[in-house]
Amino acid sequence: MLDDPRIGGLHDTASLDDIHGFRGLRQLKIVGHLPRITSFLPNIETPSLQSLSLEDTAPYVTSDGEENPRRWRQVTSVICSLFGRTVRNISLKSRFAMPHDWSVEETVTGLITPLLGLRDLERFRCLFIIESVKMFITDSDIRLMAVSWPKIQELSLHQLYRPDLSPTIQCLIDVARLSPHLRTFILSGVTVGTLVPLESVPDLSHELEQLDLGYGTNYGYRFAEDLGQIIYRLFPNLDTTWNPRKNDGGWQRVLESVSKCQHN
């Protein structure tokens, strides 16, 4: 019995009717074109799938003219109907690119709306490579995820923001208040602007261990110190040695500020 299979090559039009079963599966990764993945998922007959990873390798602009965002809404609906009772970890990876006159704006929560009903979800990761698409994530999106997934332990949102419509420091306050089990929080970027006064930040003593606010955090020393104090007030147990972007001097300065607060 395969406990952690990886299924690839779901790109062509070959029949999938004879590929079914997998009743003992707990983990599954599928790579291929999203419509084929959507068609294939009902062939997975396991009653106990806990971890699902999907990677869409379809062309930027599909041959039938159907947009990738719409297809993600379809596949997430299928995930919920088939595995909603048992799945705890979900990872999504895709590439979005549309004609330059594409005018529809997409939010991340708009793409994954069905998944917001999975109250027992513990880990959600997505990597969406975006080109020529008005896709963004805001504080409201992150707040909605936090409210929808009260047991969430990891929230990793990569390449999901527009510089003018990215989340702010408020999203840190929201997850600290709403996600008591969160241990890893990763964003591709935030809009920092003017920091909120330190005295207005609640002292929540959250147990978050790993935090990465993405690129574009090349703050000056004073700004980095102030941001570090805010983060420490929310997440005093942060592991400041965990830094996946050690060559980013701005973020390193923020972590050093947090560490300084921890040792005072």
Image (tube, rainbow, N blue to C red):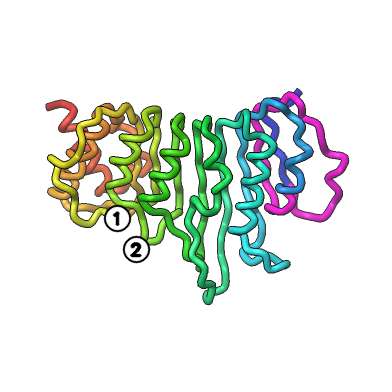
Per the image, the residue denoted by label 2 is: 164
Q: In which quarter of the image is residue 238?
A: top left
Q: Of all residues shown, which one is farthest toward the bottom?
A: 101
Residue 121 sits above or below residue 99 on the image? above
Question: Taking 114 as reference, is 156 left or right?
Answer: left
User: Where residue 142 appears, x then y in whole percent?
Assistant: 40, 46
**Which type of secondary structure does the marked residue at label 2 adopt?**
loop
Q: How crowded is mark 2: few (under 14 residues within 10 Å), some or many (20 or more)?
A: few
Q: Quadrant of residue 209?
A: top left
- Tell me the residue at 42%/38% (across/down): 147
Amino acid type assigned to the residue bearing label 1 in the image: Thr
Judged from the image, the secondary structure of the residue bearing numbered disc 1 is loop
Q: As rendered, which of 29 and 169 lies closer to the eye?
A: 169
Q: As shown in the figure, which amino acid type bears the numbered disc 2?
A: Asp
User: Residue shown at 61%/39% (left/top)?
Assistant: 53
Is 66 positioned to the left or the right of 262 in the image? right
Mark toward the start of the polypeptide (2 vs 1): 2
Magenta stretch bounds: 9-36
Percent x, y for residue 154? 44, 34
Quick check: 4 left or right of 138? Answer: right
Q: Position of residue 27 (x, y in %)?
A: 64, 30
Q: Mark 1 points at which residue?
A: 191
Q: Quadrant of the C terminus?
A: top left
Q: Using a 10 Å C-alpha cutoff, classify the residue at mark 1 as few (fewer than 14 neighbours), some (14 to 19) or many (20 or more).
A: many
- Say if mark 2 contacts mark 1, CB within 8 Å: yes
